[in-house]
Image (cartoon, rainbow, N blue to C red):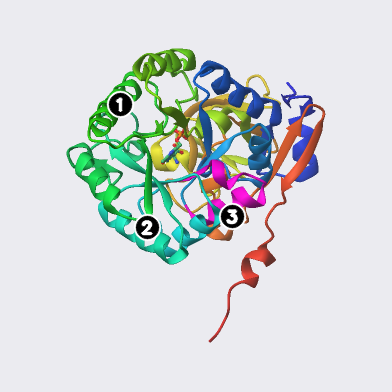
């Protein structure tokens, strides 16, 4: 079996660029974006791609070219967006820990909105804006206290989470914001979690935000937009994921004829299944009854299995019949948690090329240098063409910024 990304052979890419290697399909990126745009047609949403899912400059440039805005959570991500040709006035800034320097940078750049997550942050943003002589556009991130029914580490909309302003404090927070001279209230936002496989928490959160928007309007605070946060989940294994048209229909219905524009911040669902990770089998080893397929990718290249017990499908590009067994697929990192799959039926032998699926989101962007492993290269495929969009990191590059002082 020879496997392809668009018209390009994965074996050929592995030969040319080595492994581990992230491979992305440009057509799949476009299709995922257009899926959102067409499902929400008529609502003219501003889609702000969540840069944290995959911040490669070529991917950002591609989305910018499609008319996409961006959701950032750091000054570094803003620098990426600007370097990729993204528009500051279509960029929103989320996160509980924005520093003063990051606020100033985003103010000077002229971003569309700050998604503010607490009262202290409101005061600090007002002060930063005063110093810049700018009025900061502000949305308050409300924690709607709904259970997103996802992995606890990626659930964010419960009271127990660090995110957002509690619903019971929300109105007072808006009244306070309205008194701050260097802030201009423009919106309301939430983000209840990631890899959502159920639509109802998203719809419930939308309803709660709209009720609040109505109460604010009755007090003279008219909002311009509502931002419902990240996108829907994707299929990694056998999940059923929410239908975007059904989501759009529910939002359309709830919005009714309110004069609120819509913002969404999808990350995973725009890139997750547009990418894969190629890895080579170093060897198969056996400890007693247990088999291990040792590959050259590791938890530093794909953290998700170690961190969230996440499932990623794995294909062998050249499986040999009769060679199939149940094994853990593990990397070279010296941690028991360094696995890419556990108890998986797999055919593998030394030298085989494996394809780890659904690695477009939260894979390269969460990669680290743990065990002094250089970060893998990234390739973007477009039809029969492909481009190296990040060369493999060199060990010399990793060492040159450190000082052996003593
Ligand atoms: N907006 C905000 C404020 C967020 O915090 C996130 C994700 C998103 C949008 C994008 O959500 P998405 O559309 O991707 O579901 N590393 C984890 C996922 C962490 C998500 C953090 N926030 C994983 O690999 O599953």
Q: Is residue 166 left or right of residue 292?
A: left
Q: Residue at x 47, y 34 (%)?
A: 265
Secondary structure state at the residue bearing disc 1: helix
Q: Position of residue 100 (x, y in %)?
A: 41, 63
The span picked out in magenta is 74-93
Label 2 sits on residue: 125
**Viewer-proximal residue among 214 and 60:** 214
Q: Which one is earlier in the sequence, the residue at label 3 or at label 1?
A: 3
Q: Which one is earlier in the sequence, the residue at label 2 or at label 3?
A: 3
Asked if the magenta segment contains residue 77, the reply would be yes
Assign the magenta stretch its main secondary structure: helix
**Viewer-proximal residue among 320 and 13:** 13
Q: Nearer the viewer, mark 3 or mark 1?
A: 1
Find residue 282 and report its image quarter. Answer: top right
Q: Is residue 171 left or right of residue 367?
A: left
Q: Is residue 342 above or below residue 76?
A: above
CA–CA distance between discs 3 and 1? 33 Å
Q: Residue at x 42, y 60 (%)?
A: 129
């Amino acid at each position: 079996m020879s496997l392809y990304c668009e018209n390009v052979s994965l074996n050929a890419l592995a030969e040319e660029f080595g492994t581990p290697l992230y491979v992305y399909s440009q057509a799949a990126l476009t299709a995922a974006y257009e899926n959102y745009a067409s499902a929400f047609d008529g609502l003219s949403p501003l889609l702000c791609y969540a840069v944290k899912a995959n911040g490669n400059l070529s991917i950002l440039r591609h989305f910018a070219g499609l008319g996409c805005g961006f959701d950032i959570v750091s000054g570094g991500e803003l620098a990426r967006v600007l370097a990729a040709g993204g528009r500051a006035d279509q960029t929103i800034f989320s996160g509980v820990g924005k520093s003063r320097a990051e606020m100033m940078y985003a103010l000077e750049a002229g971003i569309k909105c700050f998604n503010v997550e607490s009262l202290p942050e409101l005061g600090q943003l007002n002060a930063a804006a005063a110093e810049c002589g700018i009025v900061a556009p502000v949305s308050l991130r409300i924690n709607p206290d709904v259970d997103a029914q996802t992995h606890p580490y990626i659930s964010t909309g419960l009271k127990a989470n660090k995110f957002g302003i509690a619903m019971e404090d929300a109105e007072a927070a808006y009244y306070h914001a309205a008194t701050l001279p260097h802030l201009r209230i423009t919106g309301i936002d939430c983000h209840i979690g990631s890899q959502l496989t159920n639509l109802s928490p998203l719809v419930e959160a939308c309803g709660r935000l709209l009720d609040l928007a109505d109460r604010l309007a009755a007090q003279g605070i008219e909002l311009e937009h509502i931002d419902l946060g990240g996108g829907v989940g994707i299929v990694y294994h056998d999940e059923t994921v929410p239908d975007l048209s059904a989501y759009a229909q529910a939002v359309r219905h709830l919005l009714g004829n309110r004069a609120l524009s819509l913002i969404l911040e999808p990350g995973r669902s725009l890139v997750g299944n547009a990418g894969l990770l190629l890895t080579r089998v170093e060897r198969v080893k056996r400890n007693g009854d247990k088999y291990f397929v040792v590959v050259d990718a590791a938890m530093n290249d794909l953290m998700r299995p170690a961190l969230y017990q996440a499932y990623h499908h794995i294909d062998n590009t050249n499986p040999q019949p009769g060679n199939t067994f149940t094994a853990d697929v593990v990397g070279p990192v010296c941690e028991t948690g360094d696995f890419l799959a556990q108890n998986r039926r797999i055919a593998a032998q030394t030298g085989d090329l494996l394809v780890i699926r659904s690695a477009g989101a939260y894979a390269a962007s969460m990669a680290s240098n743990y065990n002094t492993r250089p970060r893998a290269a990234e390739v973007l495929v477009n039809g029969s063409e492909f481009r190296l969009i990040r060369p493999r990191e060199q060990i010399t590059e990793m060492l040159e910024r450190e000082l052996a002082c003593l």
